[in-house]
Image: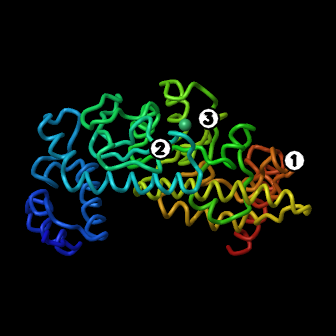
Amino acid sequence: MPAVITAREIEAIIAKGGDLNAATQDAILTPSAKDALRDHARVRGVSNNPSSSPAGPLSSKSSKADLEAFFNSATALALKEQLCDIGRRLWQREYVDGNGGNIAIRVGEDIAICTPTLVSKGFMKPEDMCLVDFEGNQLAGVKRRTSEILMHLQIMKQQPKAVATCHCHPPYSTGFAVAGVLPPTCMIPEFEVFASVAIAPYRTPGTPEMGKLVADLVDKHNTILMANHGVVSWSHNNVEDAYFKMEILEAYCRTILVTAQVGKPANTMTPGQLQDLLKIKQSLGIPDPRHGLKECELCDNDEWRPGVACAVPPKQDGSTGYDAEAEAAVKAITDQILAQMK
Ligand SMILES: [Zn+2]
């Protein structure tokens, strides 16, 4: 009977600096043990501190033997299983069609494990996964890597916080992408807190030009509508979180369309209410171009609510005649008071 290994045992092995590969080789891992292995791999993979692991972080310059050993390790298997799991969820929710969609997880300085080409995301097996460097060269794996990998890698290159990326074609969100319209804001908290959406123009899928247009947006956005194509997201947490962006955006776009059919104008949250959500967003480390904006600028979306104007008067900049006069008056009064005190 193979041994069953729990998360606590994984943690004990890591704490003692033991050999995880040897310990987990023929063993059955509990789900939380797999999570512990994954977290360990992520920390090891993105750490800049070589002392965090005897071998240091893996990179495209690691030896072929080291890369193969990692790719065949229990740690990598746990990540491959996560990719299969997310693929199944994308397919079950009808966010992918044919062999569309692709997912990647950063596993080192400039390497990632990604999904293969020409396989339905609903029916992938761990052994289908591929290891690539950040130029898209395949380093390990039997199946060929996805043709759209460059976009994922360009996101990871541009955004060091991106540990995982997810691309698919969810119909409601893609509808907005085809129309070239950003979903309106100030309606549902989930969307405001977890997603920061922008639109990238259309280019042929899989080309470096497409990847660059997306990568240009990922400093301030984690969910990019790709015009006439689909959506790509990245997460600073893990691959499931990258997938969550899809669920959140798709549910939101669907709800917006239902709202439009109800026949009453939509109620929106106030700028103050939105500001509170943005504070939560910032504390979670999620980027948003609206961080630091004034309340009055927050729900001012011309495209969807034409004529919305900033209700807060602009601050005086100190150079106007009015301010100069006011300052002179204040000075005169202050002088008078000081004179009386003498
Ligand atoms: Zn696609």
Q: In this view, does 221 lie above or below 211?
A: below
Name the residue rendered at 13%, 41% in the picture.
66
Observer-side mark, 1 or 3, equals 3
Using the numbered discs, state the Cα–Cα distance from disc 3 to disc 2 in whole angstroms. 25 Å
Ligand 1, image quadrant it occupies: top right
Residue hosting label 1: 306
Q: Which structural element holds mark 2?
A: loop
Residue 2 vs residue 202: left or right? left
Residue 90 vs residue 111: left or right? right
Residue hosting label 3: 200
* x and y, in percent, of residue 198 in the image: 63, 43
Within 10 Å of disc 3 (Cα), the crowding (few <14, some 14-19, many 20+) is many
Residue hosting label 2: 120
Name the residue rendered at 14%, 61% in the picture.
26
Using the numbered discs, state the Cα–Cα distance from disc 1 to disc 3 in whole angstroms. 23 Å
- Residue type at mark 3: give it: Ala
Name the residue rendered at 61%, 40% in the picture.
230
* x and y, in percent, of residue 273 in the image: 70, 68
